[in-house]
Image (spheres, helix red, strand yellow):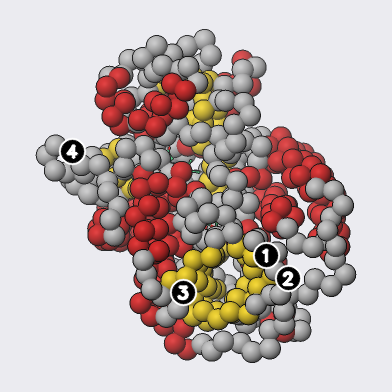
């Protein structure tokens, strides 16, 4: 199949909230191409339930939102970034509203605000229990109607193009690595196209699928950070993997269905399989403590009792109000025979969010010139060692705005690079058996779940590292010999992400936030 070379001022890899909001801003200043590896709307963004955090009314204040974010982050947040994001939040929310996103309004005309774990106030704007779907809907509609934006679905970003592809040696010490675009697999034709750009924006979302149980859709295989790492760019804080405490226990379902934290904010209570409350034994904020604490508490209760889940009890809550606020969750539970006024919901922690990622500055610029990153694939300094609930959608819109301003400036200073060769796939053939790929992915997920999950140790990390090395060698060998496929590229990326999580976890000789090791005494947080 013939490959093509295309030119765009702005290439955006990813069509969630980060990619689309960036696109809408830069499209006024040049040609834009957005690629997504499956349907445009199949993103983590579409699955977001609880909402987007922002200070809206007194008694809430910037100071409180800043403090809650800092506390959740367990001492590693960048305070300047936290202050910037919290203060810029209201303007970005207004912008989302002006773009057509609808957030629930109370009878008095004010926004209806949810409360989630780690928040000292009700401050989460939401659209029922499917806020992300609403934001994705509004942004997608605008993007599709914009004359300067071309969307290419079923296009898979394989590698960033840098000096390496022009025949120069690039190492982690090379000071001026620059990005000229990306090689992209057109999954309809199987051709690898060269997309050259003046600015590239990575918005590839999360990496949850390196674990056996995750709330993330299948697209989340860490492609962005893996591409940056291979291009010798900086990737940081990968050890801080957030497990959401309450995904629905329903064996075989992937992704795991989320039971939003907003339900606990609404009064739902965690209980053991015997129906006994337990969170007061772990934290004075009980079911509304930050996620790392609640997930570890559940993990510990499950291990002590040998149970595969704990319960979330909503039976004491007003069922009409529950149905109004959480219609999708009520329907989902009902489809499994769980009636919330009669039954408790079985829940279990699941890999949910990566706090670390591609290291960026306050404009979202990565360590590679002309390459920006935003949304979940970026590490901005906002989340530190543990993300505060509903700060992710917020981070994406604040940083997309800042990146767009800088990217527009960059675009006017940069020319398209000449002489980039076509993708070289000589000497490759179709892999003999798909099972070589799928089985390695399953093994990776097992290794990460058993040894690099909620609770870690030096020994477990070493085991994970040793086993991953075998998978790495086998997969690189396969990659060299095989024609490209989405599954093979994803496996390769997922292994890179697993490697980064393990290596960065090994380097952290303490327990902090989401990284908990039985070999290092927990530094007790002051507020406990
Ligand atoms: P995504 O929305 O994940 O989009 C990623 C895009 O990248 C997709 O278009 C995908 O196709 C594309 N892509 C990836 N790799 C490639 C590649 N190699 N080539 C081409 N395209 C590629 N956060 C909150 O703040 N509030 C919430 O209430 C909330 N609830 C959540 C509930 C669930 C179930 C989940 C899973 C997450 C939730 N989060 C929430 C987190 C939040 O939704 C995500 O962090 C955020 O939406 C990420 O947005 P994004 O734009 O960075 O990436
Ligand atoms: C949730 O609704 O519980 C998820 C919120 C988040 O991940 O920020």
Residue 404: x %, y % from top left: 40, 72
Q: Gap between marks 1 and 2, in whole Å?
A: 7 Å
The reply to whether the residue tagged 3 has its Cβ within 8 angstroms of ligand 1 is: no
Q: Crowdedness of circle 3 by 10 Å Cα count: few (<14), some, many (20+)?
A: many
Task: Nearest to the eye among marks 1 and 4: give it.
Answer: 1
Task: Nearest to the eye among marks 3 and 1: give it.
Answer: 1
Q: Gap between marks 3 and 4, in whole Å?
A: 38 Å
In the rendered structure, find residue 189 and report the number of the disc placed on it.
1
Q: What residue is rendered at 41% in x and 29% in y?
A: 329
Task: Tell me the quarter of the picture where residue 327 sits.
Answer: top left
Q: What residue is rendered at 69% in x and 56% in y?
A: 486
Task: Tell me the quarter of the picture where residue 289 sits.
Answer: top left
The first of marks 2 and 4 along the sequence is 2
The residue lying toward the viewer, choosing from 307 and 427, is: 427
Q: What residue is rendered at 61% in x and 87% in y?
A: 417
Task: Nearest to the eye among marks 2 and 3: give it.
Answer: 2
The reply to whether the residue tagged 1 has its Cβ within 8 angstroms of ligand 1 is: no
Residue named by callout 4: 106
Residue named by callout 2: 1
In the rendered structure, find residue 32 and report the number of the disc placed on it.
3
Q: Gap between marks 1 and 4, in whole Å?
A: 50 Å
The first of marks 1 and 4 along the sequence is 4
The first of marks 3 and 4 along the sequence is 3
Residue 136: x %, y % from top left: 40, 52
Describe the element under mark 4 as helix, strand or loop. Answer: loop
The residue lying toward the viewer, choosing from 195 and 466, is: 195
Q: Is residue 136 visible?
A: yes
The first of marks 1 and 2 along the sequence is 2
Cβ atoms under marks 3 and 1 closer than 8 Å = no
Q: Quadrant of the C terminus?
A: top left
Whether 66 is drawn above or below 456: the answer is below
The first of marks 2 and 3 along the sequence is 2
């Amino acid at each position: 199949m013939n490959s093509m070379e295309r030119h765009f001022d702005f290439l955006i890899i990813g069509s969630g909230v980060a990619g689309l909001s960036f696109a809408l801003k830069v499209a006024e200043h040049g040609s834009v191409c957005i690629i997504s590896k499956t349907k445009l709307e199949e993103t983590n963004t579409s699955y977001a339930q609880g909402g987007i955090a922002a200070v809206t009314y007194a008694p809430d204040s910037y100071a409180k939102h800043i403090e809650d974010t800092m506390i959740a982050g367990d001492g590693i947040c960048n305070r300047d970034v936290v202050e910037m994001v919290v203060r810029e939040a209201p303007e970005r929310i207004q912008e989302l509203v002006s773009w057509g996103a609808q957030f629930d309004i109370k009878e008095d005309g004010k926004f209806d605000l949810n409360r989630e774990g780690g928040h000292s106030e009700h401050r989460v704007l939401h659209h029922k229990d499917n806020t992300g779907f609403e934001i994705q809907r509004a942004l997608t509609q605008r993007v599709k109607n914009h004359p300067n934006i071309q969307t290419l679905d079923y296009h898979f970003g394989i590698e960033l193009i840098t000096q390496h592809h022009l025949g120069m040696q690039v190492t982690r010490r090379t000071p001026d690595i620059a990005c000229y675009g990306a090689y992209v697999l057109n999954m309809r034709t199987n051709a690898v196209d060269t997309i050259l750009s003046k600015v590239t924006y990575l918005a590839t979302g999360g990496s949850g699928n390196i674990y056996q149980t995750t709330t993330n859709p299948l697209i989340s295989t860490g492609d962005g950070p893996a591409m940056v790492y291979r291009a010798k760019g900086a990737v940081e804080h990968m050890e801080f993997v957030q497990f959401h405490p309450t995904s629905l226990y329903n064996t075989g379902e992937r992704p795991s269905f989320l039971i939003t934290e907003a339900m606990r904010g609404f009064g739902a209570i965690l209980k053991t399989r015997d129906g006994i409350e337990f969170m007061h034994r772990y934290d004075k904020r009980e079911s509304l403590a930050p996620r790392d604490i609640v997930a570890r508490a559940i993990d510990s209760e499950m291990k002590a009792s040998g149970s595969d889940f704990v319960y979330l009890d909503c039976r004491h809550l007003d069922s009409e109000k529950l149905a109004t606020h959480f219609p999708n969750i009520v329907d989902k539970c009902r489809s499994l025979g769980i009636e919330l006024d009669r039954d408790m919901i079985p829940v279990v922690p699941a890999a949910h969010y990566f706090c670390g990622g591609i290291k960026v500055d306050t404009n979202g610029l990565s360590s590679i010139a002309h390459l920006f990153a935003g949304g979940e694939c970026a590490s901005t300094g906002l989340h530190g060692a543990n993300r505060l609930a509903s700060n992710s959608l917020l981070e994406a819109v604040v940083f997309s705005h800042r990146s767009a301003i800088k990217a527009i400036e960059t675009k006017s200073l940069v020319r398209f690079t000449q002489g980039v060769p076509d993708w070289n796939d000589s000497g490759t053939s179709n892999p003999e058996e798909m099972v070589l790929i799928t089985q390695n992915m399953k093994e990776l997920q097992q290794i990460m779940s058993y040894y690099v999950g909620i609770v870690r140790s030096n020994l477990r990390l070493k085991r994970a590292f040793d086993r991953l090395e075998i998978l790495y060698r086998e997969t690189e060998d396969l990659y060299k010999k095989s024609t490209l496929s989405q599954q093979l590229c994803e496996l390769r990326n997922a292994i890179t992400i697993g490697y980064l999580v393990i290596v960065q976890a090994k380097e952290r000789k303490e327990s902090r936030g989401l990284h908990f090791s039985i070999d290092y005494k927990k530094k007790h947080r002051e507020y406990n």
